[in-house]
Image (tube, rainbow, N blue to C red):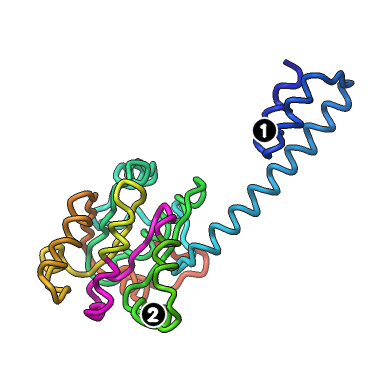
Amino acid sequence: MLHEPIKQQLTRLGLRGAADALARLSLADDVVDTLAVLLEAECLHRDSLAQARRLKLAKLGQRAHPADVDLRTPRGLGKTRWQQLLSLLWLNQHQHLLLVGPTGIGKSYLACALAKAAIDHKHSVRYLRLPRLGEELALLQAQGRISHWLKTLGRVDLVVLEDLGLVPLSPSHQPLLLEVLEDRQQRGSVIVTSQLPIKLWHGQFQDPTLADAILDRLVHNAELVELTGESMRKKARSAPANDDKPQAAV
């Protein structure tokens, strides 16, 4: 049993052969302690590298941390609801999350904070800002890489779709959104932020049949958070300057 923690570390590092051989070795206590320290350092190093890779892959629209979210300002998001969202139960159950509310209410920050929480729990994330997605898709189509893009995105645990309806996707690109959602059925989740009420989403798509298919996959398996209130940015601008009190994140 003395070697059990070290065996677990070796297995965690993928060194199963070494873990099996450990049981046959007789090691002095100081050797065991030194080996444990070295293996823990390697585990932490690999975890750090993996975290950096997940953050780089995500390409989040802004730096956001769950602990910095402002829960004091009334906007339809209390502490209990926020903690429930941070539990990531919806993500683990492959549900979607819809953040809907007026401009400046903090939807983007909340989405990125939840994405950061997912990354911290070793989930892969990809952030896509829909008003600029058309440019990326046009380039990918010109390069013949759409299939590769869809396949890569399909392996991601959580996709953030920012600003649905702010600028409608071109009709030629709208079917790709359906493919993105289809690939996530029972395998991944989506966070969508939008200024538009859900009842207006259908009108963002040229083909009613396509709109029905997209909304069926997106809305009917989703948790909805409807935010209300004044713009957080407007409040920040109108607040009196005070160098001793840092502005709260949204």
Please identify the quarter of the rendering in which residue 195 is found.
bottom left
How would you rate the neighbour count of disc 2 (Cα within 10 Å): few for under 14, some for 14-19, many for 20 or more? some
Which three-letter amino acid code belongs to the residue tagged 1? Thr
Closer to us: 146 or 180: 146
Q: Is residue 157 magenta?
A: yes
Q: Residue at x 38, y 44 (%)?
A: 88
Gap in angstroms between the C-alphas marked 1 and 2:
43 Å
Which three-letter amino acid code belongs to the residue tagged 2? Gln
How would you rate the neighbour count of disc 1 (Cα within 10 Å): few for under 14, some for 14-19, many for 20 or more? some
Can residue 79 be seen in the rendering of this structure? no
The magenta-colored residue range is: 154-177
Horizontal placement of 155 versus 204: left or right? right
Closer to us: 59 or 8: 8
Horizontal placement of 59 versus 209: left or right? right
Quarter of the rendering occupied by the C terminus: bottom left
Query: Which residue is labeled 2 in the image?
Result: 141
Closer to us: 239 or 225: 225
Query: Which residue is labeled 1 in the image?
Result: 11
Give x and y (percent) for residue 19: 73, 28
Mark sitting earlier along the chain (1/2): 1
Please identify the quarter of the rendering in which residue 152 is found.
bottom left
Please determine whether, in this image, residue 26 is positioned above or below residue 152.
above
Give x and y (percent) for residue 210: 16, 67
